[in-house]
Amino acid sequence: MSQAKIPRYLIRLLLFLLLPAGAWVWLEIRVAHIPNSYNTKRTYFEKSMGNVETLILGPSHALFGVNPADLRGVVFNLSQINQSVYYDQALLLKYLDRMPHLQQILWCIPSTSLWQSLDLTPDYWRDYFYFHFWDLNSPYISWKSPMRYSYVALYGTDKVLEYLGKGLRVNLSDTIDEHGWLHAHGNSDSLGEGPGRRHAALHSTYFAHEAAYRDNRRRLHEMLELCRSKKIRMILFECPLLPYYKDHLNPKMIAQTRQVLEEMSRQYHIPYLDYSSDSVFHAADFYDDDHLNVGGANKFTPLLQQGIDQAEEDGY
């Protein structure tokens, strides 16, 4: 019996469809392996977590401002740009059982954190970086979003085209060291009173996120209860800020944050160290209006260690 032959036009059509599909798969794989602050930090952290004694959590204030090398013991900085309380908790729960030597957590809670939820901010796309690079499937991940399924969509076509122009030889995490600290040198173009006002105005809009505030207060209690049950020392702190950023934040946010953290300090008998208005820091110490540069971080971190030591002497 003779076998039917596939018409040549069908073969050509199949090749026409398979070639771009193969190119797309290749591009997705290559883009997925671009080093960024999420996958790089995870690699560093998972290599060292079994020995880590002190863990730093919080948003970018801690990422820029706390140098683990200036603290005692084995320290890792697990903070991230716009890292919310939700992800601080999710990361700790994911890894706590694999950190046998963890003794203390330094948790940076600036005045905006209690009202922050990434899905309500312009940085909502960061939810999908946690999804892809930390395997954290949060309730904020939408089944409808192409960022859930595509790394090209995650970075955006404009960025991917830019990376293609560089032969995909890009490293988005070259300022992150093996301890998780971001090295920000000098002063950025966004350092100044005008950018500080605009930045503060944007962050002040978070005060309308009442549901996020309630959820984050609950998470804060859950984290503190967990640490108390595990006999892990918790230190709450705020990093230095420039006045032309802090002075234009919603004052109700600042006052309510201070009230909540002071209540937590009393209830759980833990230190709350507030350096947000420390006058020893000047514009030369900052990368931008609310982030320290390398020099500022190396100036601040020893002060933070002194504060931790003093709190311990005071019985905290």
Image (tube, rainbow, N blue to C red):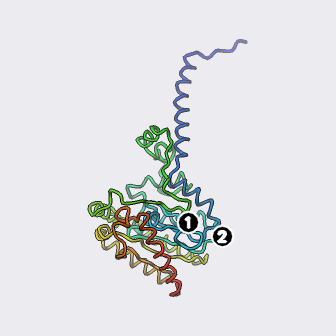
Instruction: Tell me whether circle 2 and circle 1 mark residues in contact (CB < 8 Å).
Output: no
Quadrant assignment, res 51: bottom right
Give the residue number, with chain letter if any, for mark 1.
76
Residue at the location (31% across, 68% down)?
249
Residue at the location (50% across, 57% down)?
176
Numbered tag placed on residue 92 in the rendering: none
Q: Residue furthest top?
A: 2
The x, y position of residue 177, in whole percent, is 53, 59
Residue at the location (58% across, 15% down)?
7
74 and 94: which is toward the camera: 74
Determine crowd level at label 2: few under 14, some 14-19, many 20+ residues with C-alpha closer than 10 A: few
The residues bearing labels 2 and 1 have C-alpha atoms spaced at a distance of 14 Å
Q: Is residue 177 above or below residue 166?
A: below
113 and 181: which is toward the camera: 181
The x, y position of residue 174, in whole percent, is 50, 53
Q: Secondary structure at mark 1?
A: strand
Determine crowd level at label 1: few under 14, some 14-19, many 20+ residues with C-alpha closer than 10 A: many
Give the residue number, with chain letter if any, for mark 2.
100
Q: Secondary structure at mark 2?
A: loop
